[in-house]
């Protein structure tokens, strides 16, 4: 694996972590402002589970393609 490829993989991983954190924080904030929707922590955990499932799917597709 070349250095450029490794740097790009690490950069994309960092962006994924940052975006995931923002999405989870947004879900928790919205449910905190509208408590009828659900408890904030439960919604944030559900959103995190969904994000993890998407990432695992993407990693599986990349692994099968190479």
Image: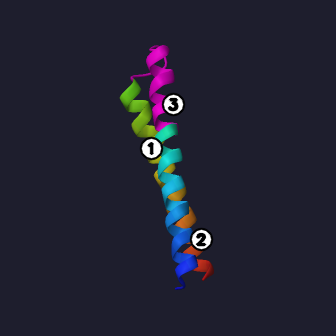
Whether 58 is drawn above or below 46: the answer is below
| Residue 33 appears in view | yes
Q: Which one is earlier in the sequence, the residue at label 1 or at label 3?
A: 3
Task: State the residue position of label 3.
Answer: 26
* Residue annotated with mark 2: 61
In this rendering, which labeled residue sits more in front, label 2 or label 3? Answer: 3
Q: Residue 48: x, y in percent?
A: 44, 44
**Circle 3 SS class:** helix
The local crowd at label 3, few if under 14, some if 14 to 19, many if 20 or more residues have their Cα within 10 Å, is some
Q: Position of residue 41 (x, y in %)?
A: 36, 30
Q: Residue at x 50, y 61 (%)?
A: 13
**At 59% across and 71% down in the image, what residue appears?**
61
Q: Is residue 25 magenta?
A: yes
**Which mark, by number, is residue 19?**
none
Q: Marks 2 and 3: CB-CB under 8 Å? A: no
Q: Can residue 50 be seen by looking at this rendering?
A: no
- Closest to the observer: 31 or 12? 12
Which image quadrant: the C terminus? bottom right
Neighbour tally class for label 2: few under 14, some 14-19, many 20 plus, Cα within 10 Å: few
Measured in 3D between alpha carbons, the distance from the residue under mark 2 to the one under mark 1, in whole angstroms, is 20 Å
**Magenta highlight range:** 23-39
Res. 28 image quadrant: top left
Which quadrant of the structure image shows residue 63? bottom right
How far, Cα to Cα, is label 1 from label 3?
A: 12 Å
Q: Looking at the image, is mark 2 or mark 1 earlier in the sequence?
A: 1
The residue identified by callout 1 is: 48
Q: What is the C-alpha distance between the residues marked 2 and 3?
A: 28 Å
Badges 2 and 1: C-beta atoms under 8 Å apart?
A: no
């Amino acid at each position: 694996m070349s250095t450029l490829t490794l740097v790009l993989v690490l950069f994309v991983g960092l962006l994924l972590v940052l975006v995931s954190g923002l999405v989870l924080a947004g879900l928790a904030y919205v449910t905190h402002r509208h408590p009828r929707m659900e408890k904030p922590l439960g919604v944030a955990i559900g959103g995190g589970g969904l994000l993890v499932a998407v990432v695992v799917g993407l990693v599986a597709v990349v692994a099968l393609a190479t």
